[in-house]
Image (cartoon, rainbow, N blue to C red):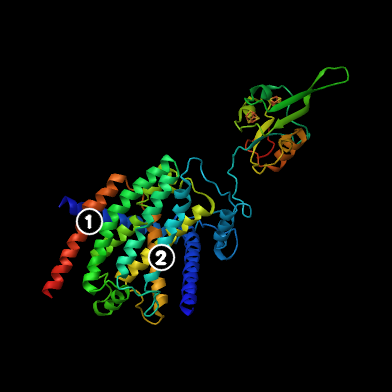
Amino acid sequence: MALLGRIWNTAKSMFVGHSITLREMFTTPITVFYPEEKPPMERGSRSVPVLKVNEGTGLLNCVSCGLCERSCPPSCIKIEQALDAKGDRQSWPEAFELNLSHCMVCNLCVEACPFDALEMADVVELCSYQVQDLIFDKQQLAEIWKTSRSLRVANGERL
Amino acid sequence: MNILLAAILKVIGVLMFVGLNAYILIWGERKVSGHIQRRIGPIRVGGPSGIMQSAADILKLMSKEDFVPSGADWWLWVLAPVVSVAPAVLVYLVLPIGRTLVLRNLNVGLVFFSSVSSFTLLGIFMAGWGSNNKYSLLGAMRAGAQLFSYEIPLILSTIGVVMLAGSLTLQRIVAAQTHYGWFIFPQIVGFIVFFVASVAELNRTPFDLAEAESELVAGYFTEYSGMRWAMFAIAEYSNLFTLSALGVTLFLGGWHGPLLPGWVWFVLKSYFLVFVGIWIRWTLPRVRIDQLMDLGWKFLFPVSVLNLLGTGLYLMVR
Ligand code: SF4
Ligand code: SF4
């Protein structure tokens, strides 16, 4: 009797399994044809840290404090503070370099920034055959920020 | 001279069919598995639904390096793919494709089929031993145990049909099904045993222990690449077709069918069984080796013997 029960159970579970796969075979596939058809990025997706621009003045929010540089575990941020003619330090960066070939998208730099000058953009198509192409300067980072959807509402700038 | 020419033409025809069959089945298997998993399978390479994918695969395989692993037993290693393709091609000799369309109407067709197709095991063993690789050897050992234990129920399940038809000639067996109707109805138990055992004979999931990717890399053909690997693949898909065709011959009425010519019915039914095989492969998970042995010896074997007994009793009392 137990044997018959096992045979029945086997047959039943095989029938159920095969009917599921047969049904799946005739449902529409969920494949997205990626390069031709781009799935929307989720809001709040974190892909690369970029520099925010104050839309009123057109200047970077960054004051060149260097906290992001120190907080970055793989050290991919390089900041050079601006100096005036007398050699006094100014509150904006002369150069801000981000080496995306090292960046591990950990968000630590964004959290470290006390002036809300960094943000994660939702840009993902940044592949390149040369490491050189992955080192972004401050203009490029600001450009990416302008074209990407920001996540945080900061200083009433934009959504 | 004419006989020679005809023989050469037949060989070329069979070889072309074997190649074409493997081409279509490899593509078809990828398509079916894709759709079962809600993907779409290959589409990019060209042709409708990416049918050129297999052509690209062939080109890739042909351009690969001819690599022999160090320490391999050269003769065994090189001959193994040939030995596994040869029986796959040979069994086409007796397949009754149409009412008069059969390459050679042997009076021991069924015996020829089962004995020739068990040569595949020799190829598998040669590959496993010759590769000098522990995964290959383990795969070959498993294949040996599995093929031995499933060959017996496979053959026993066909004997019921032979008893009803009263002949070992595949043509006569098909012809007898006009009288009895398709043998799947009186021999439903035999058909189930035959089908399960033939899936196991083909080393396909859920009985793919001999080439279990997650345990043995690829089993007995771990060390093979390029066209040598392709020969194993061709043999596998050719065997898938021929065993399905044997199932159609014995149980599903062979070339019987309305309207369409006989050979069309034969091919259609065979490909239907092939589809069922692919469907099973992408549904069921792999069984353990002890479950495999249990199923073979403790279930299929006694069931097929009981089936024989029942058939014999029926033939006595009728
Ligand atoms: S996201 Fe992480 S790794 Fe990338 S720049 Fe910021 S701190 Fe460095
Ligand atoms: S932490 Fe913010 S303000 Fe300071 S240097 Fe980095 S980006 Fe500029």
Which chain's residue wears label 1? B
Which chain's residue wears label 2? B
Q: Nearer the viewer, residue B216 or A87?
A: B216
Q: Is mark 1 within 8 Å of ligand 1?
A: no
Image mark for residue B74: none
Report which quarter residue A108 is drawn in.
Answer: top right
Determine whether, in the image, residue A31 is placed left or right of residue B275. right
Kind of element beneath mark 1: helix
- Can see residue B207? yes
Q: Residue B238: percent from the left, percent from the top?
A: 43, 62
Q: Nearer the viewer, residue B278 or A30?
A: B278
Above or below, B4 relative to A123: below
Image mark for residue B301: 1
- Can see residue B34? no
Label 2 CA crowd tier, 10 Å (few <14, some 14–19, many 20+):
some
Determine whether, in the image, residue B49 is placed left or right of residue B236. right
Residue positioned 70% across, 27% down in the render: A77
Kindly identify the amino acid type of the residue bearing the numbered disc 2.
Answer: Leu
Q: Residue B149: percent from the left, percent from the top?
A: 28, 53
Q: Which residue is mark 2?
A: B90
Q: Nearer the viewer, residue B180 or A37?
A: B180
The verdict on a common chain for dots 2 and 1 is yes
Residue positioned 41% across, 72% down in the render: B268
Kindly identify the amino acid type of the residue bearing the numbered disc 1.
Answer: Phe
